[in-house]
Image (tube, rainbow, N blue to C red):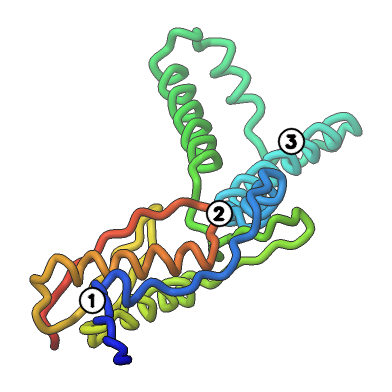
Amino acid sequence: MTLEAKPEPQTTPQQQTAPQTAPVAPVDPAADKAALRAFKPRRMVAASVAALVLIGIGFVAAVEIISTLVNRPVGWLPKAPALSWASATPWSSPQVLAAASVLVLVGLGLLALAMKAGRPHLVPVRTGDPDLIIGLQPKGFAAALARAAEDVPGVHSAKAGVGGGRVAVTAYASGWNDARLTEAVRHAVLARLGTLGPINHYRVSVTMKERR
């Protein structure tokens, strides 16, 4: 009796590069919220400037009030000219309106700066535990995705950039105009993203270039 060898099925680049992904931590909204809050960038410069300005104004006002109450005014502020100008200037004066507009714009600018999401220093990853918070360095995160692209057969080197919820991968290979190779690189990067488990969602774009 003879045994006939069965031909091995041909594999596509996507099948060749599909990694065995590690189990992803379960989605826990409380844990995700805790990690995002922990790695939220602090507006230290703007907050420090605003705090110093308010402290300075408060200090000068307190010194002026206390010194006047004890009949020993320090005279840091020109109170008499200021009171004279204020009593003679109506609210509809262009100077008053201009000063009020400047203060409103400064306040709105500080409010917008505080509300605008900044660039986090670490990439939060999902752990499923609110008490366990893990973050990856952005450079290390991008390097791991670049190595995933380099693991695809036919890719000689790759680099990745992360920003704005997007992963931009540039892979160098011979015969880079093969659409299957482009899709294989994208599949490998998505698989690595699934393994790392970042909390934020990332779109993946792949650019293939001729081997350098």
Front one among 14 and 154? 14
Tag of residue 199: 2
x and y, in percent, of residue 111 in the image: 54, 35
Q: For the residues carrying marks 2 and 3, which lies nearer the camera in this image?
A: 2
The label shown at residue 10 is 1
Mark 1 near mark 3, Cβ–Cβ under 8 Å? no
- Residue at x 73% of width, y 39% of height: 58
SS type, badge 1: loop
Q: State the residue in front, 187 or 53.
A: 187
Residue shown at the point (59%, 24%) measured from the top left = 82
Three-letter amino acid code at the position of disc 2:
Ile
Relative side of 145 to 209, left or right:
right
Vertical order, 36 against 167 (above or below): above
Q: 42 or 120: nearer the eye?
A: 120
Closer-to-camera residue (100/127): 127
Dot placed on the residue nearer the N-terminal end, 2 or 1: 1
In the figure, residue 101 lies in which quadrant?
top left
| Relative side of 212 to 64, left or right | left
Three-letter code for the amino acid on which mark 3 is drawn: Ala
- The picture places residue 173, in percent across and down from the top left corner, at 16, 82
Alpha carbons under labels 2 and 3: distance apart: 47 Å
The structure residue drawn at horizontal position 57% and vertical position 70%, both measured from the top left corner, is 22
Q: CA distance from mark 1 to mark 3?
A: 82 Å
Q: Which mark is residue 61?
A: 3
- 1 vs 3, front mark: 1
Task: Determine which of the numbered discs, if any, sits on residue 179 in the image.
Answer: none
In primary-sequence order, the first of circles 2 and 3 is: 3
Give the image location of residue 210, x and y in percent: 10, 80
> Image check: 164 left or right of 130?
left
